[in-house]
Structure formats: C-alpha cells, structure tokens
Amino acid sequence: MFAFVVLELMISRFTPCMFFYVIDDRIGLGREFDGIGGLSGGGATSRLLVNYEEPYRSHILDFLFKPNFGASLHILKVEIGGDAQTTDGTEPSHMHSKGEGNFFLGYEWWLMKEAKKRNPNIKLIGLPWAFPGWVGEGTQWPYFFPNVTADYVVSWIYGAKQHHNLDIDYIGIWNERKYDPVYIKVLRDTLDRVGYTNIGIIAADGDWSIAAAMLDDPYLNDAVEVIGVHYPGTKTVKEALLTEKKLWSSEDYSTFNDDIGAGCWARILNQNYVNGRMTSTISWNLIASYYKNLSFGGDGLMTADEPWSGHYVVESPIWMTAHTTQFTQPGWFYLQTVGNLTHGGSYVALTDRKGNLTIVIQTMTHSHSQCIRPPLPHFDVSPQKATFQLKGSFAHLTDLQVWYSKLDFKTKNDTLFQRSSPIKVYNGSFTLKLDVDEVYTITTVNTGQKGAYPEPPKSQPFPKNYSDDFTIDNPPFSEAPFFADQTGVFEYFRNSTDNGSHAFTLRQVVTERPVTWARDAYQTISIIGDYSWTDLSVSCDVLIETPVTGGVFLAARVDQGGESVREAKGVFYWISANGTYKVTNDIGGRRVLAEGLSGTREGVWYTLTLRVKGYFATGMLNGYPLWKNAVVLEPKNGWAALGTLSFEYAQFDNFKVNAE
C-alpha cells in the first residue's frame, strides 16, 4: 500500500495532468479582432532605418510588413511629428510655422507607403506627441485653441492623402497627456466637416479615465471610436466595458527585444484579450532603429541600428508576432470560449466566420515574460496536457496546421516559428503536451511562412573617419544620414544666397520652443557617430544667422540624448554673434572650461575644429588656435554633435570627424 502511494505521488509529480478546454461558436462570438501593430515614433525610433542601403532596407521592411513572411503587422501607428523630443529624438512637423505646410519632411510618410506597398490592407494611425509652438500660441498647451489644433491635425491627414495617397484610418489626441473633452468633440466635428467621417478617433492614449467621462457625456462617447490605453498590464476597467467601445492596448511592450521581451510580447498578445477584452495590441516600438545608447536602446520587434554596415537582427519578438498575425486578420472574431490554462498560460481562439479557426496558446513563465512596465504579479506555470474539444462549426475538422516556438532559457537554443506536422483531430478533439515558455498556433490557415533572406553583413562600428558636405540637390529625405536630432530639427537646405561652396547646407529650422512632450534642451542639438568615441577631432563650417544673440556649437563626447538631453555633458565649443566664444562641459553652459573673444558675428562662415584627447581639449577657428588645453575630466566618451545656442536658424557645412 505504501509503495502504491509513493508511485502515485511520483506519477502526479512527473506526469502532466490533463485538462479539457472547449472551442465552440454555438454560444455566440466575442469581440471583433482589430489587429496587431507596431509604433514608429515617440520618438524618432525609425530614424536610422531610412539610411540602410538596398537590399537590406527592403529585407527589414519585409520582416515587418510583408504578409505571411515575418511579423506581418496589421497596423502601423506613426508619430505626427511636432519638432520636439519625444523619447529618442525629434521628428519634424509638417508645419514648422503657421500656414506653411511641407508634407515631405521626415520619414513617416515613406514608412507608411512602404508598409502599404507590402500590405495594402494595413491600418494607419497618426498620433501627436508634441506640437510646433505656434499651435499653442505661446501657452505650451494645445487645447487653449482647439480649432487651431484640430485644423493642424486634419492638415496632416489631408497631406497624407493628397501628397502620398495614404488613407489614415485612425487619429489620436495627445500621447499620454491629459485629454480635453472639448478638443475631442471639436476634432470630431472638424473631421466630419471636411468629409473624414470614416476616420475614427482613439482616446486618450494614456490610462482608462476617459471611459468614465464617456459614460457621463454622450457627445464625447459619440466622438470616440476606440478607447486606447497604454501598458494596461492586460487588465481593463468596468467603465470601459460599459461603453461597449473598441478597447485597445494602443501602446504596449516597451521591452528589450531579447527572449524575455519575446516572452512578454507573446504573453500580452493573448492576455490583453483574455483578461482585458482588448482587441488590438500595438508595440512600442516598431523597430530599434536609433542609436542604442539613447533611451530604451534595443526595444522594438527587431533591431536595425547600423545602416553604415547593413547589419540588422530579426529578433525573437518578430516570430511571437507571427504566431497571431499570419493566421488571423482584422475582421475575424474572438470566440467566447477563450481563457487561462489550469497550470498557467492562456489560449485564444478566433474565426473568420467562414470556417477558419486559429488557436494561439502561450505558456510563458513569470521570470521569462516580464515587461518593463507595469509590474507583473506572481504566477506559476508548469508542464501540462491540454485537450481541446472542438464544437459547433469546428466539430467536423479532421486536421489542423501547427506552428511552434520554444524560448529555451536553459540551452539558449530557441525554436522560433517552426512548422510542425499537422495535428489529427479525433472525434472533434486533440491533445497537446505543453511545456513552459512555449507558443503554439493551431489553425486551419495553411499560408504561414517563416520568411528568410541571406545573412546581412556583420556588425561594424560607426566609421572612425566620416564626412558630409550636404551637397545633394533632391534629397530623398529631409535629414542628413546618421544625424539624430535631439532638440530642434536639422534639414537639408538649398542656400540661394550662396552660389559657391555653401550652396547646399544643413540648417536648424525650429525658431520657437515647441509644445513639448519630453524635457527638450533649451539649445538645439543633433548627435552622430559612436557613443564609445573618446579621442577625436571634429570640424564643421558654421553660419550664425541671428544677430547679437545667435550662436552655434560643435561638440564631442556627448553622453546624453533622448529625454535626458537637457543633462548632456561633453565638450561643447560655442561661438556667438556677439564676438565671443565659450567652452563648456555641458549643453546648458553651466560649467565653463574656457571663454574669451572670437570676433565672430552673424552672416559669416567660420570653420570650427574641436580636438579632444585624454583629459585635454583644443579649439581652432578658421584653422588657427583659439583656445587650447582645456581640462576635461568627464565624460570619457560619447557622440559628436552640432547645434545652436537657442531655437534659431543656423547653417552647417563640410562636417568631418576623425576618431582614434
């Protein structure tokens, strides 16, 4: 008897128990599935992607957007650039000043067209993070003049259609900032008045609080089509459900794209619906295509941050995405029979109501699926057997396609999006032996494919010797390669007043502090190069355009960007229109290393050269030493940079950097 009990305990310990789950559409369907997406912006997260050479750039885009190939995304959400820092850089507005629109600035237009080229059915969303200063008319608040702000946003929608033949499907309010019910209703009226009745408003891209307000205000409720929330932890609130509106996790993930990030993504793609009835989940960000030492370096569904080498990495979150996106489409419906597995994990089932069925199962463990935010309550997952009983429209199915992934944290030998032998369905049921940290897609859809291209070039650091004279007559993009604006906007410029050596330049064009989202610096700055650079020489021709108060700088060892740009340290070499120079250890100019007279003024081209070696820095003006041996104790390394003293016009030409 004793031996029997021991044997029984051993069996129960080492043999997974079996549990039954019903997949049935006879009791009706759940919510309509709206798709899985990625977010380019918030900010400048796709900045380096445009500088990849072919064929690598197209390969990357295929992994993101091409149906039945890689992530096969259903939704692309982009930032409506506002000339301000929005996490990893600034994205240019289509209207730097009132009444002067330019719908060819930045790269989001290009990215939307590339996505549409691969998937004509992809849904497009626009959302502002910041606004040009004129929108707030000096108030730093875009809601004081709701008609002005609504007209500005609608002009972006108009430009997308008129200049790029892009139809925007949804529009947002103001990312992660307090919403204004009056503005939302004005925006709805403005959209309707110009014929954009089919464009839905997503609000408020923050927390759930707008749901309660919608229940109290029928006009606000009518104006909003989708309640969008950020980082909900897979949970919703009763007020949101009572509105009967579409519920989306309109920004989620925000996690490093290693295997734990893949586990986070796989888990929330299921549980956002199972726990929160959210029918769309959008990843911030789409692709880690910005300097890795900026904020949240290495987030995104994949990595492409070396356009100078062509190197990119198709990370595991791409294949976690494919488990859902390649076997469902917006317009499918979740079944009501979805839920959590008895020993941890979850499953969802969706149908196109035409006989197709897709079941996605995930068994991610707690320690292997934590997102950066919010904190994840403890839960347990253990091996288990699961029997799925197919009923209703699916009872007749006899075999199903199987796609499988295993994040193997012990061996580091992952299995990613592998097609397995079809599973046989007997008497309407099939059984799976589930281990931990796995994803299964069981489906009637047979068009799935794990796309592949030849290996990209090997990783290489940024070139130690780099130069750009900005001489390009019809640039494909408004920004010069590899320059990453952190405050202000630097654009290619045709200098009509100079037909000689400075006919083509790079110009800083933001002249008024924007309605900001992050902590922009009071000085404009664009970084370039390798964060590990220590000893280097950087030179550039510069033109101050603002009399008396104007100024420009050249910098080395810049150690901060993104939302921390205001705290950037380095070696900053400034010249001013008032005839002085200054060398500072920080962008704010608080720690002065050297200063004196330079004789510089506006309207004259000067060549600045900055050399930093060890603990000493030297500066030259037009080839002659202006100051030397300024002591630099920190930082030890950082990017090169250029910029201006304030929000002002200034030009730059013949940029060169030589790093040791």
Image (cartoon, helix red, strand yellow):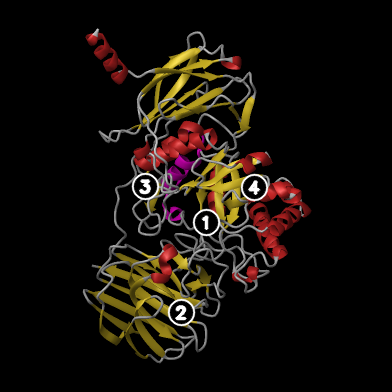
Q: Name the residue under label 3.
A: 312
Name the amino acid type tagged 1.
Answer: Tyr
What quarter of the picture does the N terminus occupy?
Answer: top left
Which-is-in-front pick, marks 3 and 2? Answer: 2
Mark before the other along the chain sequence, 3 or 1: 1
Mark before the other along the chain sequence, 1 or 4: 1
Which-is-in-front pick, marks 1 and 4? Answer: 4
Q: Name the residue under label 1.
A: 107
Q: Give the range drawn in magenta.
A: 49-72
Name the amino acid type tagged 4.
Answer: Ala
Name above or below for residue 51 compared with residue 572.
above
Identify the residue at the far right of this view: 193
Q: Where is residue 385 in the image (x, y as percent from the top left)?
A: 39, 19
Q: Position of residue 197 (x, y in %)?
A: 74, 47
Q: Position of residue 401 (x, y in %)?
A: 46, 20
In terms of depth relative to the viewer, which is nearer, 357 or 61? 357
Q: Residue drawn at (52%, 25%), measured in percent from left and top?
A: 358
How far apart, in angstroms, are the residues tagged by discs 4 and 2?
Answer: 44 Å
Give residue 150's mark: none
Q: How crowded is mark 4: few (under 14 residues within 10 Å), some or many (20 or more)?
A: many
Q: Are marks 3 and 2 in contact (CB under 8 Å)?
A: no
Q: Is mark 4 on a helix, strand or loop?
A: helix
Mark before the other along the chain sequence, 3 or 4: 4
Q: Name the residue under label 2.
A: 645
Q: What element carries label 3?
A: strand
Which-is-in-front pick, marks 3 and 4? Answer: 4
Mark before the other along the chain sequence, 4 or 2: 4
Name the amino acid type tagged 3.
Answer: Tyr
In terms of depth relative to the viewer, which is nearer, 626 or 397? 397
Which-is-in-front pick, marks 2 and 1? Answer: 2
